[in-house]
Amino acid sequence: MVKKLLQNLSNAHGVSGSEGSVSDIAKKELEPYVDELLSDTLGNLIAIKKGDSFSVMLAAHMDEIGLMVKYIDEKGFIRFVALGGWYAPTLYNQRVVLYGEKGLIYGVVGGKPPHVMDEEERKKPLKTEEMFIDIGVNSPEEAKKLGIEVGIPIAIDRELTSLAGSRVTGKAFDNRVGVTQLISTMQHLDTKHTVYAVCTVQEEVGLKGARTSAFTLDPDCAIALDVTIPGDHPGIEKKQSSIEMGKGAAITIVDSSGRGLIASRAMIEWLKKTAEKKKIPYQMEVGAGGTTDATAIHLTKGGIPSTTLSVPTRYIHSPVEVVDLADIESSVTLLTETLKGKPKL
């Protein structure tokens, strides 16, 4: 069930500011299990399971990094800007889908062919501004007839595929994995507390949806659900990340070297003690780079005790991210067991 849900969410297109398709899937999945569903002004999907006066916010961002049409040149090639943290060479020669005004339009990201590059050019990675999107037209007029205009969002065109064992690869696992965690947890929820399950928007461009929804809901505590970088493959050392795939979700102590989140010790202990009591695999993380919705949430109003529960995911911010479904499943078990209790705030 987790695999099918992740597949539906991952295959959907929802770059920052255009998360509607993902929200529609989440709404359909959550509706039978919650007491109230609403969307706020910014586009956050808020699912509420009513309980006692103690409230917990679960937050998972729906948006994926993407692109947007900046202008269309005289030959119909599309120049674009990046939305979110792309490593530019990752984009070169990818197939993309444009959310045209008349429907989806497919294209490819092109650039100067290496065959005609001189020696110095080959040494330098292509920059975003040196690339373009080819949708098969010959003029801006033809592009406009297809519904392509300035401001049209663009996503990578890639579908989830199984690897060996319980591992899968696809796009936007950052953070459709978190949305999968959130939905699955609500579907198995057993708690007396009030739970706000929030599928947030625009995390990749500034943690925006988490900030506004946390301000409105003002929960007693919060757990952000996201992905994190493991240090168990070539090109990265364990001293950079001690997290490993297949060993459970990671409880965040600090991320971004403290510039982002310094997590609530009470929240850390709540998750940690539950994992130990129920013999659920988990890992502890102190991160030097990257942050999550928890950073925005814990600074809202007078401060909200928060931490992050992250699933190890390889090759984040690429079209070929890799996750172990067993880590997602154990994280859901940890969340549902934890929510039966209450942190000592």
Image: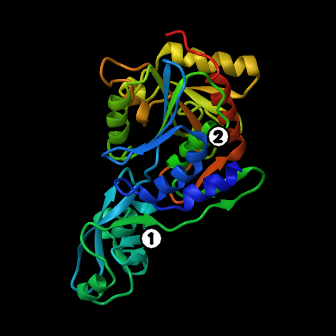
The quadrant where residue 108 appears: bottom left
Residue depicted at 34% across the width and 69% down the height: 121
Apparent side of residue 247 relative to residue 223 in the rendered image (left or right): right
Task: Work out whether residue 245 or residue 215 is closer to the camera in this orientation and state it.
Answer: 215
Label 1 sits on what residue type? Answer: Val
- Residues at marks 2 and 1, CA–CA distance in whole angstroms: 33 Å
- The residue that mark 2 highlights is 187
**From the viewer's perspective, is the residue at label 2 or at label 1 nearer?**
2
Label 2 sits on what residue type? Answer: Gln
Q: Position of residue 259 (x, y in %)?
A: 35, 26
- Label 1 element class: strand
Residue depicted at 24% across the width and 70% down the height: 150
Q: Position of residue 131 (x, y in %)?
A: 33, 70
Q: Position of residue 304 (x, y in %)?
A: 40, 20
Which label number is shown at residue 96?
A: 1
The answer to whether residue 291 is visible is no
The mark total stands at 2
Q: Position of residue 244 (x, y in %)?
A: 65, 36
Relative to 294, say whether 193 is above or below: above
